[in-house]
Image (tube, rainbow, N blue to C red):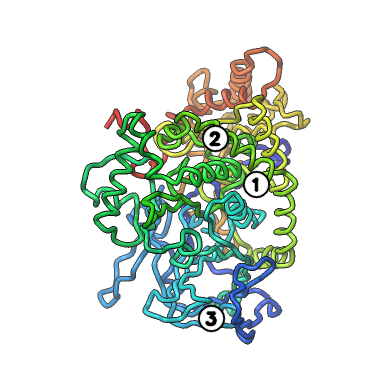
Amino acid sequence: MSEFLRAGFSIVRPLSAALALFMLSGATIKQAGAADRKDKSDQAPSSKDDTFEPGRLHTVQIALSEKEFAAITPVAASRGGFFGFGRKPEPKEPAEVAREMHRNMFGMNLPWATGSVSIDGQTIDNVGVRYKGNGTIGDAARTVKKSFKIDLDHFGGTGRFHGRKTLNLHCGVADPSKCREALGYRLYRASGVPAPRTAFAEVWLDVPGKYDNSLLGLYIIVEQPDKQFLQAHFGSDKGLLMKPEGLRDFVDMGDDWKKYTTQLKPKRDATDEEAARMIAFARLASKADDEEFRREIDSYLEIDGYLRYLATTAFISNSDSFFALGHNYYAYLHPATGKLHFFPWDLDRSFANLPIFGSKQKQMDFSMTHPYSGSHRLTERLLEMPGMSERYQNLLKELAATVFARESVLRDVESLEAEIKAPFERDAQAAKVRKDGIAGFGPFVMLGQPPDLRTFVDRRTKSVAAQLAGTSQGHIPTGGFGPGAFKLVDFLSGPMLEDLDADRNERLSRAEWLAAPQRLFEASDKDDEGQVNLKGLTKGVNTLFPRPTEGEGGQPGPQGAFSAGGYMAAPIFKRADADKDGKVTLSELVAAAEALFDLADKQKMGELDEPAFYNLLTALFPPSNFGQPLRRPAGDKDAAEKKAD
């Protein structure tokens, strides 16, 4: 992104990758070279359960027939898909048996297929294989290296891998370091939060006539929260395990348990007692007065664990979580105590890797007490209890001196990087051979890479120290999903300032800003008089913010898919067309840019810091001019929406 000033708006060179949310393809890739197509199945399986031992690199081979491989391609649940992306559902042939599918939170159906898997030499046939993920499905739309869920007993098989029935293989497509999940889970566990263990693996794919034991690359195996996990962490697997979706705040919906299950998503049928307990908890959290809440909450919630979960989520800037988006977490109702325990899931977007909540600089400065946008009723009611805020601050000080200490976290980073050095290099080479398209889900990576982990650790620990010293409150994020929350400027401001800032003083001068409209005009189609209409300007924006390529050969994205010009050109054109003749000149574009700069430069300093630049972009791209906001998952409504309902 440092090439912005020379290449214009190429800061968003992945805006295509960025904004084409679900351009899913069953694209083929070139197979790895013969040296990479080694058959690992002759390795003797280990009888020792060293699955999650540090330094252990596993070998996993997935074998699917050509038909089964084609069948697992994600399918849009409706004709339009999500924002029009994803393979459209096709009419089934009369003889075709309907496949079982998992539907993700964005309405994509992920079909199950039958195949075989070899893990460290242990081959298990007739296993269930499907792609997994929500945003990850879009992130990996242009590569065959996708995340997999493998259920060893899905089709009635009895095979097990060290007693485990499920294998989660996360591709790490959104994480340039490939270490975020391993590091994040490690920090949760060290903080006293039950969290899955992880291990690294190299994964190979065999599809006759398509992939001859081809190396997909480096993956992370994430422990499934199953009976073994529950027994190890809670001393019992008899409680009610839930994996909620779209649930940030627990709301009283009456006495009908079925109304709660859509969001709570229990992993088995709840007993009458469990259902009653969860309903009572929702009622307590949402309707009880302060006196009742303070008196009863300790009998419903494992408070110390909850505070540790909050602290670690805040420290690793994990917005893709319970507190911000209402998903990627588990809740466990303990059978003996009747208390709820929370623990995390899917951490590839942690460590300042979710730009919808602000620039990476802002994410590295998240508030340790309010690391989410809007309100979070349960957390806020808890911290408002007498003595609870002090208790939480003491916990933060304890963790800051131990688990979150800069030197300690950097040692973890170094050990993980050393562990994956060789497979990381092979992974990069495999992607190069395949000619993978740009990786990215929606706007999440349109503005470049997240901070490297060392930078994150350095800045985050300084931010936490300042907050504990009382010299900073930290950044309370904005953004997210829902009306008024999805703003173009949340993506653009920080990274765009970084790339336009030619002298790297973290401020934008007038000259640096005025380089942008000149690049845009140069990229736009002009008429015989050298002027640009809206269509020409739209093409110019799309030239500077191209759609992503798809799969092998770098084919452009599908026609009709989301384009930057379709959203950005109109407000730019409207502001620049001063004489309203339906055309703009270079001087009009520059004049409009100058007026915006003057509007934002309230102190008349001749330069803008990030908040001022954010205001400039907000004036240029107000939410009402940036299309419709993404729909927030059901049940995740703020007070204004509830009132409107």
Crowding at dot 1, Cα within 10 Å, few <14 / some 14-19 / many 20+, comes out as: some
Q: Give percent across and percent down for residue 483.
A: 39, 33
Residue type at mark 1?
Gln
Residue type at mark 2?
Arg
Q: Give percent across and percent down for residue 82.
A: 40, 50
Residue 449 disc label? 1
Crowding at dot 3, Cα within 10 Å, few <14 / some 14-19 / many 20+, comes out as: few
Residue to which mark 3 is pinned = 209
Q: CA distance from mark 2 to mark 1?
A: 36 Å
Q: CA distance from mark 2 to mark 3?
A: 61 Å
Residue to which mark 2 is pinned = 391
> Up-down: is 628 above or below 228?
above
Does residue 602 appear in this view? yes
Q: Residue at x 68, y 80 (%)?
A: 34
* Residue 402 figure quarter: top right
> Up-down: is 559 above or below 369?
below
Q: CA distance from mark 1 to mark 3?
A: 35 Å
Front in this rendered view, residue 461 or 294: 294
Q: Quadrant of the C terminus?
A: top left
Q: Give percent across and percent down for residue 359.
A: 60, 36
Front in this rendered view, residue 455 or 9: 455
Q: Residue at x 37, y 45 (%)?
A: 300
